Image (spheres, helix red, strand yellow):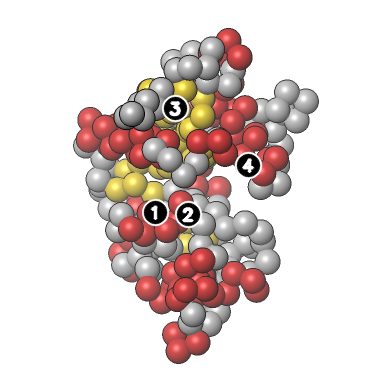
Amino acid sequence: MPAEPAPYTVRLAATPQDLIAAQRLRYRVFVRELGGDGPLVDHANGLERDAFDPHFDHLLLVDRSIDPATEAHVIGAYRILPSDRRAAVGRFYSETEFDLTPLLASGRKLLELGRSCVHADHRGGTAMFHLWNGLAEYVLDRGIEILFGAASFHGTDPRPLAQPLSYLYHNHLAPPAMRVRALPPHRQEMDLVPTASLDRRAAMAATPALIKAYLRLGGFVG
């Protein structure tokens, strides 16, 4: 028998309930799974949030089989902001950590991506495919030319990440005209291992799936 189609819908958050559901999913992924935190994270109610949330669009992957009243209907999310709305916000979120001058000076239509996550029960299937299809529609509808954002490795110690960081540096570094740089004091040089000592298999095995997916789409790192 043919498999039942996944009960997914991709849309922008339209209600406060939608945003709360996205923040609840983000808490599950970024706080419980990955150990993140922040000054506005609501541990009592299980919400990962910050001051940028009210100003951004929230692209949601919704499971239609889940009652929205449960605030568990959002099983995937992206937080996005096009450059024509940056002035109203004051800055992109990434500007808290990176010098985006090359991108801002490019004159191109930009879209910042962030807070990308999918519920653990929906990973490995078509969930991310649906979410990316929705993102593609958003990009095409608005004439976006460059997508960018921060993507993370787990942990803050660069030593166990020397292979993947160096592999990205030697093979996927952005062109100089588009290359952003992390701001001090948290900037970390990426060329930790010489090319001759790189183990591509080990490097890719240690690279998060989302970063590998961006590379397959032609992405670069700063």
Q: Of the numbered discs in the image, which one, if any, rests on residue 157?
A: none
Q: Which residue is mark 3?
A: 60
Amino acid type of disc 3? Leu
In this orientation, which residue lies closer to the viewer: 127 or 217?
A: 127
> Which residue was labeled with disc 1?
213
Tell me whether circle 1 and circle 2 mark residues in contact (CB < 8 Å).
yes
User: Circle 2: is it few (<14), some (14-19), or many (20+) Cα within 10 Å?
Assistant: few
Q: Earlier in the sequence, mark 4 or mark 1?
A: 4
Determine the secondary structure under disc 3.
strand
Secondary structure beneath dot 2 equals helix
Q: Quadrant of residue 131?
A: top left
Dot 1 amino acid type: Ala
The reply, left or right, for residue 26 in relation to residue 88 is right
Q: Quadrant of the N terminus?
A: top left
Question: Which residue is more in the foreground, 214 or 105?
Answer: 214
- Residue 124 horizontal/vertical position (percent): 46, 44
Identity, as a three-letter code, of the amino acid under mark 2? Ala
Of the residues shown, which amino acid type is indicated by label 4? Phe
Percent x, y of residue 99: 47, 56
Cβ atoms under marks 3 and 2 closer than 8 Å = no
Quick one: SS at disc 1? Answer: helix
Q: Secondary structure at mark 4?
A: helix
In the depicted structure, whether residue 36 falls above or below residue 23: below
Find disc 4 in the rendering and name its residue: 30
Spatial CA distance of label 3 from label 2 is 20 Å
- Residue identifier under label 2: 209
- The answer for how far apart the CA atoms under marks 1 and 2 are is 6 Å
Where residue 54 appears, as percent x and y from the top left, is 52, 24
Q: Residues within 10 Å of mark 1 (few under 14, many from 20)?
A: few
Q: Earlier in the sequence, mark 3 or mark 4?
A: 4
For the image, the number of numbered tags is 4
Q: Is residue 26 visible?
A: yes
